[in-house]
Amino acid sequence: MALSAKNKEATKPKAIIFDWDNTLVDSWVVIHDALNATLDDWGMEKWTIEETKSRVAHSMRDSFPLLFGDDWERAGKVFYDHFEKTHLDRLTPLPNAEYVLGELFEMGIHMAIVSNKTGRLLRLEVEHLGWNKIFKNVVGSLDAVNDKPAPDPVILALQGSGIETGSHVWFVGDAVIDMQCAKNSGCFGVLVDKNQPKIAEFGDFMPDFHTNELSGLPNLAKTL
């Protein structure tokens, strides 16, 4: 793990907000299959799994109008009809995710989720894995006035904690949009990715901290 010298120093976290997909769980195959089924229903060219991973980041209400135009709400319903058939059965925690959450929970850190997955489905997945006791707040798309990368869902994720945004709030995610949300809300952005972040990709939203492995978070939080 390595800190970027240009970014703010790590502060012991009072709260950690996690992204969901590809940060704590692997649900890309389900998302990919449901998206391609929807594209196929509209007579559009299907995406590769690599395209899905690189292009799916924003919430449906922000992204589907660009894909489906005025028909985006009907396309969204079709997508979720496909998605809900299998998403719980195929939901898989990423390696070390359960260990990391357990360690941080024992430290008494306020933990929450902010995702651009629809809130209702997000909470079903959290409950399915038995993690609903770990996370104080689970915030998905449509739960706040605006979705990630706006700061609104972060404020909602801290509700009831007495904690205000700042460098003592870590936002942990795997994508540029997570680092954008961290910066927009004044939090400490932690990128979890096996690849080194590049300025060409992240621009003004370079992470404050980068780690190749999620498993390093508890030790970092303990030693600060």
Image (cartoon, helix red, strand yellow):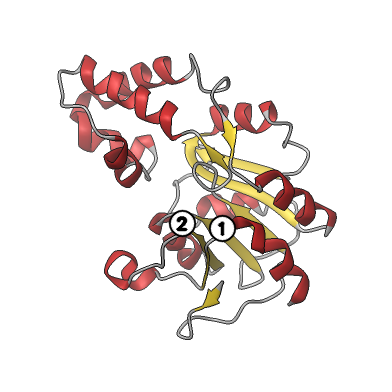
Local crowd size for mark 2, using a 10 Å CA cut-off: few (<14), some (14–19), many (≥20): many
Residue shown at 36% from the left, 29% from the top = 32
Front residue of 163 and 14: 14
The residue at which mark 1 appears reads as: 172
In the image, what residue type sits under mark 1? Val
Residue shown at 67% from the left, 26% from the top = 128
Residue shown at 62% from the left, 26% from the top = 124
**Image coordinates for residue 188, horizontal then vertical, percent:** 56, 69
Q: Residue furthest bottom?
A: 5
Say if 21 sits above or below 76 in the image. Answer: below
First reached walking from the N terminus: tag 1 or tag 2: 1
Horizontally, residue 74 falls left or right of residue 220, namely: left
Horizontally, residue 91 falls left or right of residue 168, namely: left
In the image, what residue type sits under mark 2? Asp
**Image coordinates for residue 20, horizontal then vertical, percent:** 55, 43
**Image coordinates for residue 181, horizontal then vertical, percent:** 46, 59
The quadrant in which residue 164 appears is bottom right
Identify the image quadrant of the C terminus: bottom right
Horizontally, residue 192 falls left or right of residue 38, namely: right
Q: Secondary structure at mark 1?
A: strand
Query: What whole-number distance in Å separates the C-alpha atoms at marks 1 and 2?
Result: 7 Å
**Image coordinates for residue 85, horizontal then vertical, percent:** 48, 14
- On residue 60, the disc is none
- On residue 178, the disc is 2
Local crowd size for mark 1, using a 10 Å CA cut-off: few (<14), some (14–19), many (≥20): many
Say if 21 sits above or below 157 in the image. Answer: above
Q: Secondary structure at mark 2?
A: helix
Residue shown at 33% from the left, 41% from the top = 62
The quadrant in which residue 170 appears is bottom right
Identify the image quadrant of the N terminus: bottom right
How many marks can you see? Answer: 2
Answer yes or no: do the residues labelled 1 and 2 have beta carbons within 8 Å? yes
